[in-house]
Amino acid sequence: MLCPDRVLQDFDTLLPTYEYVDSDDQAEPPALSERGPFVFTPDAQADTSQPPTAASQTRKPDETIVRYAHRGMQQALKGDLIDEGAEVGTEHPDGNGRYVDLVARRDEALEFYEIKSGHSPRLCIREALGQLLEYGCWGDGVQPARLIVVGERPFDSEAEAYLAGLRHKFQLPIRYRQIGAPVD
């Protein structure tokens, strides 16, 4: 059950976006986070304010299971990266007013992860690539050592060839990582 305070907090967060959409074409898009220098901040503790990984909704004559795949994938990836010895920050400000799904730091090198729940690596890459490029290349921000698309589906040979081509032709430090979201 949602708490009214949480709903009002969400409305406060969404108000600048509503005002932008309702404004003239000359308005600046709203920043989702404060702009400034990128400062890596690992998560101090688990964030319990996030939605659950699954919920059920009863509709006659069936029951529908709604899966919050992104949250489950993010938590699973975070656990894997911590087990690998990385420091991890989730929903991390990029310094340009946006949030990166997950930032990991290993030996002072930063990795930016964008999580997608598409039905194929191709769809995940298509949806994540622009975001990763913006987080890693926009403005005078930090230059991550690696940009990583995260999906549930196994990496196939076509996707592997595509990313290899991007790495070669454009010198992009782009990778794909498969993660299995926990199923409730």
Image (cartoon, grey):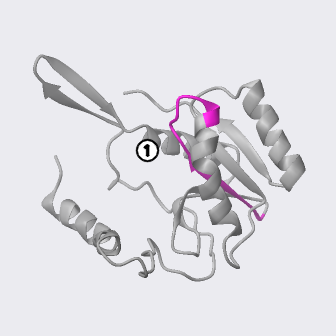
Q: Report the front residue among 1 and 81.
A: 1
| Residue that carries the numbered disc 1 in the rendered image | 71
Q: Position of residue 80 (x, y in %)?
A: 62, 40
Q: Report the front residue among 27 and 144.
A: 27
User: Relative to residue 5, is residue 109 drawn left or right?
Assistant: right
Label 1 element class: helix
Q: Report the front residue among 20 and 73.
A: 20
Q: Position of residue 128 (x, y in %)?
A: 60, 49
Q: Position of residue 171 (x, y in %)?
A: 86, 55
Q: How many marks do you count on the picture?
A: 1
Name, please, the residue furthest toward the right: 168
The answer to whether 144 is drawn above or below residue 178 in the figure is below
User: What residue is shown at x 74% (from left), y 44% (from top)?
Assistant: 175
Residues rendered magenta in the picture: 108-122
User: What residue is shown at x 67% (from left), y 38% (from top)?
Assistant: 177
Q: Quadrant of residue 151?
A: top right
Instruction: Say which amino acid is labelled 1.
Output: Arg
Residue 113 part of the magenta-drawn span: yes
Residue 13 part of the magenta-drawn span: no
Task: Answer few, some or many: residues within 10 Å of disc 1's Cα (few below 14, many 20 plus, some between 14 and 19).
Answer: some
Name, please, the residue furthest toward the top: 61
User: What residue is shown at x 50% (from left), y 39% (from top)?
Assistant: 73
User: Relative to residue 171, is residue 12 drawn left or right?
Assistant: left
In this view of the protein, can residue 26 be seen by the observer?
yes
The answer to whether 158 is drawn above or below residue 104 in the figure is above
Pick the quarter of the image with the C terminus.
top left
User: Relative to residue 15, is residue 162 drawn left or right?
Assistant: right
Q: Position of residue 55 (x, y in %)?
A: 26, 34
User: What residue is shown at x 77% (from left), y 65% (from top)?
Assistant: 108
